[in-house]
Image: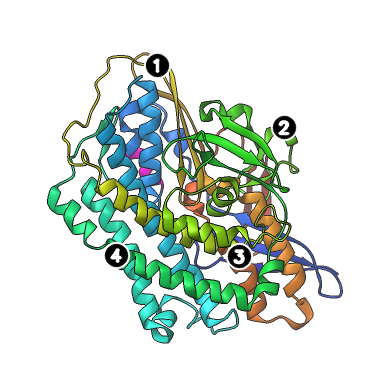
Amino acid sequence: MSRVIKIDPITRVEGHGRVTLHLDEEGAVEAARFHVVEFRGFEKFCEGRHFSEMPTLTERICGICPVSHHLAAAKALDVICDVTPPPTATKLRELMHMGQLIQSHALSFFHLSAPDLLLGFDAPPAKRNIFGLIAEQPELAKKGIGLRKFGQDVIAAVAGRKIHPDFCVPGGVNRALASTDRDALSARIADAKSWVHDGLTLLRGYLEQHREFVARFATFPSYYLCLTTPDGDLEHYDGLLRVKDGAGKLVEDRYDPANYLSLIAEATEDWSYLKFPFYRPAGYPEGSYRVGPLARLNNCERIGTPEADAELAYFRSLATDGAMVEASMYFHYARLIEILFGIERVEQLLSEPDILSDDLIAESTNLKSEGVGVIEAPRGTLFHHYFVDEHGSIEKVNLIIASGQNNQAMNQAVTQVAREHVRGNALEEAMLNKVEAAIRCYDPCLSCSTHALGQMPLRVQLYDVEQRLRSEISR
């Protein structure tokens, strides 16, 4: 008789999810599923609100990702109002965005994933966390905490507060950067660079020492999607869509993100509230793709800052077939490279001669019926699409979140890792932690991801006090 092992909840991720492992009679894993079990209907209850509320309304989707939603919403409103923000406003938006990139990636690596890599997958659960890391490697832990604080302080200096800022408005921003804040941040750049370089050195050592394990861990070909500049360079705030296949072949380039619906479709499964986006020309599930730091570094021609480009050269050497870096574990390396890029970009933006300008808002009296805002959030490409009536009320919202676009990849990752490492007849906690670690590679934000447009699969079960199933309905 087949058996099912549940990992519930998945730990050290944002949001709530579980994994089920289906075993055969010998205890080997036949199949594995990553279930996202929470549902939050932001797309629906945004309807009827005035479009100007969207930057501050949608950022409440998450306390980890508010800046990303704030920016994507603001970019959609720029389109609706048919307005281009002044150069200083765009630079300040990007500066805030880099703060978000730094703090989110630092949280993911140092707080959530480093305990597995540096303390061991088989370390006791009570130790395998940020507090255990502080006890074992206090200096490294302090540097990781310091990097996250630096990113948060960039957000606060630009937008007035670290979480849920009220900063972006249609056509610009509502707050100038103070010279004292600019100077204080500039003075911390050298330390921040030093900290991330220490993290990179340590991680490269781990990857070299465990090269064979890393090369097999949740490794599979896929499509990769992200924004790039028109020349194919790394881009987070603006840009055009680029897609490569698993062999590194460029299949889409300079694709207008406003037309994303002709490029991306979404499938559903009856065992998860999280949808399964896919590359439309290839179909589902063959067209499943990955987004986020691994996709961005696989897709881009260069990063565009000197120290991060030097790291990119080593990253590219890790490709087993000379084309794409496929192993999920390399998401962590790509994440640290992007922290370095973020710090370098903060340094560049702070040195711009007009960064303290008070020319912050472009006015408009136009009102279009829809707008699409797309950015590269830390976890991957984020789409906000709004439809408004003639009075500016929201009629419909579509959100495609980065973690959702990695959904099929996370399912492939847990299946592959479970089949290799889990033995149901001799079960050990470290085996299950490796399955969780496969998900943590993608740093999913499940709170952000579960926002359904249209009909979603739903199952409601009624149990009595004896835990007997009395009734069940589904759609």
Q: Decide which of tag 3 and tag 1 comes sooner along the chain.
A: 3
State which region is magenta.
56-61
Q: Residue at x 53, y 63 (%)?
A: 333
Q: CA distance from mark 4 to mark 2?
A: 46 Å
Residue type at mark 1 is: Lys
The answer to which quarter of the image holds residue 280 is: top right
Instruction: Please name the residue that numbered disc 2 is placed on.
Output: 281
Q: Is residue 57 magenta?
A: yes
Instruction: Please name the residue that numbered disc 3 is placed on.
Output: 329
Q: Which mark's residue is nearer the viewer, 3 or 1?
A: 3
Instruction: Please name the residue that numbered disc 1 is placed on.
Output: 368
| 401 sits left or right of 468 in the view | left
Residue 236 position within the rendered picture, expressed as x and y whole percent measured from the top left: 44, 43
* Secondary structure found at label 3: loop
Q: How many marks?
A: 4
Q: Which mark's residue is nearer the viewer, 1 or 2?
A: 2
* Number of residues whose C-alpha sits closer than 10 Å to that of mark 3, classed few (under 14), some (14–19) or many (20 or more): many
Residue type at mark 4 is: Ala
In which quadrant of the rendered image does the N terminus lie? bottom right
Q: CA distance from mark 3 to mark 1?
A: 43 Å
